[in-house]
Image (cartoon, grey):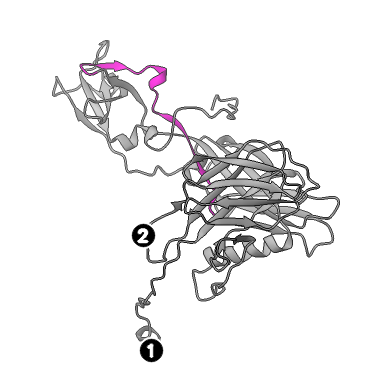
Amino acid sequence: MLLMVSCTKPYAPKITTTVTNYLVVEGVINIGSNDSTAIKLSRTVPIESAAGIVPEHGATVTIQDNQNQTYSLTETTTGLYVTGELNLDSTRQYRLNVTTADGKNYVSDYIAPEVNPPIDSIGYTIENNGLQIYVNTHNPKNTTHYYRWDYTETWHFHANYESDWVTNGSAMVPRTPSQNIYYCFTNDISNDIILGSSAKLAQDVIYQQPIIFIVATSEKLETRYSILLKQYALNTAGYNYFTELRENTEQLGSIFDPQPVTGLTGNMHCTTNPTIPVIGYITAGVVQQKRIFIDNMQLPKYFTPIYPFTCEQDTAFYSDPKPPHDNEVLPYLIESPANIESQALYMQGATFPYAFLFTDRDCADCTIRGTTIQPSFWISNQYGL
């Protein structure tokens, strides 16, 4: 045992700095009329770099079919190129054409749209002190076999304390409904590569494919949670590409994981200089999607969220240093001129507070982590949430 301990020591490998700056192409050509097509362009960075995603701005992006029809995409935000619902001919083949601001041209192989069956259902099970969300789908023609999913989460949550008062610059006044900062909405997108295959099964059936696991203490499940799941069909080459990509990015945490794959090859190519690597695999087909809502009332009682900040209250603005007994005090939260959340204390029968309890903004203002604007797709439940 002493020998084993003595052999363990930190190791800082020498990383050879190389100039990469390769183009990364992400997206799906949606030939259907149920959603837009969005292509994301970015650049790789050295492994030792502290920089995050580097979007590729100012490119010209088009979709071309094998009958010389062209469809243009518009850059809506830096590095994101979008076109509306296309409703394309499923019997044609399509490719992506990208010309970057530096004049280099990149094209994908022509690809035939893959048949993507509808999502049958999204469900969940309670396990391992949390919520496991899964998807079911099948193709009765037994022709798809390879699938990929991503998702957008949206949830309704609230601050630790409710703030009913706000300053107007010279005095404390009750908040109006439009000034609510207790209930908010926020969202997140998937970052993992989620794949499924029925290739080794007699039937093209995906049953309870895991999508995301949410721990019982997550704030996502505090009041109401929704997930919009999108499903994509892949061919064999596309499935193999995303499998290798997942092994390179998500499964390199221990000595038992697969070794990094070198020469990861997609179906994008640089026509200006064929020796320049391009990262990305473009697929085509109808994107299937489905949304579900999960209420906290549907979950076990021990599903109790842990607030992400430590919250305390203190007193301020006392005009009487000896407040009345607790049964004569009515608490309300307000916001002080110093942008500190506060709580007003009333003398019994009084119409204006004589003292305040206050807390940090993190504990009483949900807008620092979300928005009070309800999403257009949100459907309130029987509790109005």
What residue appears at the point 58 percent right and 56 percent down from the top-left corner?
Answer: 106
Q: Which residues are magenta?
A: 169-193
> Crowding near pointer 1: few (<14 within 10 Å), some, many (20+)?
few
What residue does disc 2 label?
A: 50
What residue does disc 1 label?
A: 3
Q: Is the N terminus in the top left, top right, bottom left or bottom right quadrant?
A: bottom left
Residue 39 % position (x, y): 58, 47
What residue appears at the point 53 percent right and 46 percent down from the top-left corner?
Answer: 189
99 with respect to 309 (left or right)? right
Residue type (three-letter) at the residue carrying disc 1: Leu
Q: Is residue 190 on the magenta stretch?
A: yes
Residue type (three-letter) at the residue carrying disc 2: Ala
Numbered disc 1: secondary structure: helix
Kindly indicate whether the residue at mark 1 contacts the one at mark 2 (C-beta within 8 angstroms).
Answer: no
Q: Is residue 330 above or below residue 12?
A: above
Q: Is the C terminus in the top left, top right, bottom left or bottom right quadrant?
A: top right
Residue 228 % position (x, y): 61, 40
Residue 209 % position (x, y): 68, 54
| Residue 309 visible to the viewer | yes
> Crowding near pointer 2: few (<14 within 10 Å), some, many (20+)?
few
Could you say which is closer to the camera, residue 265 or residue 142?
Answer: 265
Q: Is residue 13 above or below residue 313?
A: below
Numbered disc 2: secondary structure: loop
